[in-house]
Image: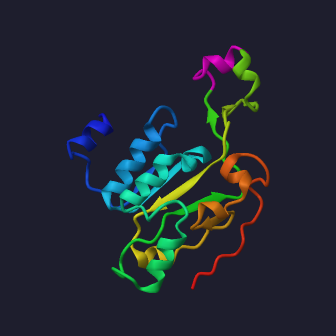
Amino acid sequence: EDFYAAAASGQTPPFDVLLTNPPYSADHPERLLSFCTASRRPWLMLCPNWVYERPYFTRLLRAGNGGGGPSGGASRRRAESGAGDPHASPAVFFLVPRKRYHYWTPRGRRTDLEAGTGKAKTHGHTNAALGVRTSPFISFWAGGGFPRPIADSLRAPAGCMLEWDLARLPPGVRDGAGGGVGHRPAKRSHT
């Protein structure tokens, strides 16, 4: 079934939370984020770091129920001050693993990697059980649309950092250069 056709015709099944890891090619991240923010439902989306820096990311979050933009700070402060609906969703949040995710392509699925072409040399290594490691970028989760009481209770699970402001993530997480995933962001007050 074509998800985009179902979404356009309003025929998606009912859901409480949308969890997605969209294809990273073409306009899939933008289309899925558009659906997420328009759904007015809680959502979590695993994407490469470059998605969060695209202009559409900010535009869609401001237009939808995703939380008011990737900086999150101003809308989060508004929600915390009690302005508006007490159940309104606060800003989008980012959940970043302290250890980078690695993706594995099963053997035989990527002939360009198996053939030893130039692209094969840019990828990590192979594993008999897992296949070929293909992790050309850092990826992490963005979430939004959660009711305020739930969002306020969020805490980072072990091995992850939780941040409400994209700019406060370590530079190595945001742009793939510099500090690296293991750097800890400044502590954020949960008051």
Task: State the image coordinates of residue 92 (x, y, percent, origin top left).
Answer: 49, 64
Q: Is residue 72 above or below residue 102?
A: below
Q: Is residue 115 visible?
A: yes
The structure residue drawn at horizontal position 60% and vertical position 22%, both measured from the top left corner, is 110
- In the rendered structure, the answer to whether residue 178 lies left or right of residue 189 reads right
Q: Is residue 109 magenta?
A: yes
Predominant SS of the magenta segment: loop
How many numbered circles are shown?
0
Dividing the picture into quadrants, the one containing residue 181 is: bottom right
- In the rendered structure, the answer to whether residue 90 lies left or right of residue 114 reads left
Task: State the image coordinates of residue 10 (x, y, percent, origin top left).
Answer: 21, 47
Q: Is residue 99 visible?
A: no
Task: State the image coordinates of residue 100 (x, y, percent, origin top left).
Answer: 70, 50
Q: Is residue 185 magenta?
A: no
Q: Is residue 121 above or below residue 64?
A: above
Dividing the picture into quadrants, the one containing residue 1 is: top left
Instruction: Please report the bounds of the magenta region as a residue range.
Output: 107-116
The structure residue drawn at horizontal position 44% and vertical position 36%, both measured from the top left corner, is 27
The structure residue drawn at horizontal position 70% and vertical position 75%, both measured from the top left corner, is 187
- In the rendered structure, the answer to whether residue 4 lies left or right of residue 45 reads left
Dividing the picture into quadrants, the one containing residue 107 is: top right
Task: State the image coordinates of residue 145 (x, y, percent, origin top left).
Answer: 40, 64
The colour scheme is rainbow
Q: Is residue 170 above or below residue 127?
A: below
The structure residue drawn at horizontal position 54% and vertical position 71%, both measured from the top left corner, is 73
Q: Quadrant of the C terminus?
A: bottom right
- In the rendered structure, the answer to whether residue 10 lies left or right of residue 191 reads left
